Amino acid sequence: MVLAFPILLEAYTLTLYRLGFRTAATWLEDVRSGCAWINPSAQDYREATALVGRFSDQSISLFDATLAILASRLNLPVWTYDHHFDVMQAPIWR
């Protein structure tokens, strides 16, 4: 499993706020040993800003667009049920 740093940051924060420090720390330790971590490039972020502009009728977040760009570049599917990834034509694992 590959985990992009923006997802790591967001998931840790959500876990921390909803379940507390102990659960978040345990989750972080599990993720540390079970995933490869990658960082989107500056170009990935630039392409994501262009991608959201192509779908002005959708509420696609820059976070999701960055992940879609990264997944497409690396040819790795996104594990999601968010329909916005279908709209962006990102590779999806279901």
Image: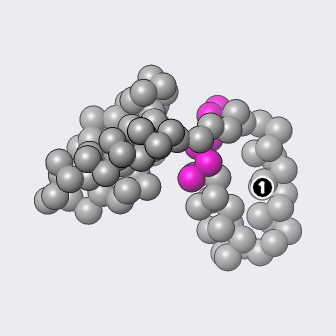
Q: Residue at x 45, y 33 (%)?
A: 71
Disc 1: which residue: 27
> Looking at the picture, how far across and down is residue 43, in whole percent?
41, 39
16 relative to 9, above or below: below
Q: Is residue 94 visible?
A: no
Q: Is residue 55 above or below residue 10?
A: above
The front one of 61 and 83 is 61
Q: Nearer the viewer, residue 81 or 65?
A: 65
Can see residue 47? yes
How many badges with numbers are in the image?
Answer: 1
Q: Position of residue 53 (x, y in %)?
A: 20, 53
Residue shown at 83%/61% (left/top)? 25
Extreme residue toward the left, this view: 57
57, 53: nearer the viewer? 53
The quadrant the C terminus occupies is: top left
Outermost residue toward the front in this view: 42
What kind of element bears circle 1? helix
Which residue lies most toward the top here? 75
Picture coordinates of residue 48, whole percent (x, y): 34, 46
Residue 46 in the figure: left or right of residue 70 = left
Q: Give the residue at x 78% y 55%.
A: 27
Residue 64: in magenta span: no
Q: Nearer the viewer, residue 76 or 66?
A: 66
Residue depicted at 45% across the width and 23% down the height: 75
Highlighted range, magenta: 1-7
Relative to 20, residue 5 above or below: above
Q: Quadrant of residue 4?
A: top right
Residue 2 is a magenta residue? yes
Q: Residues within 10 Å of mark 1 (few under 14, many from 20)?
A: some
Percent x, y of residue 66:
42, 46
The N terminus lies in which quarter of the figure? top right
Identified by mark 1, the residue type is Trp
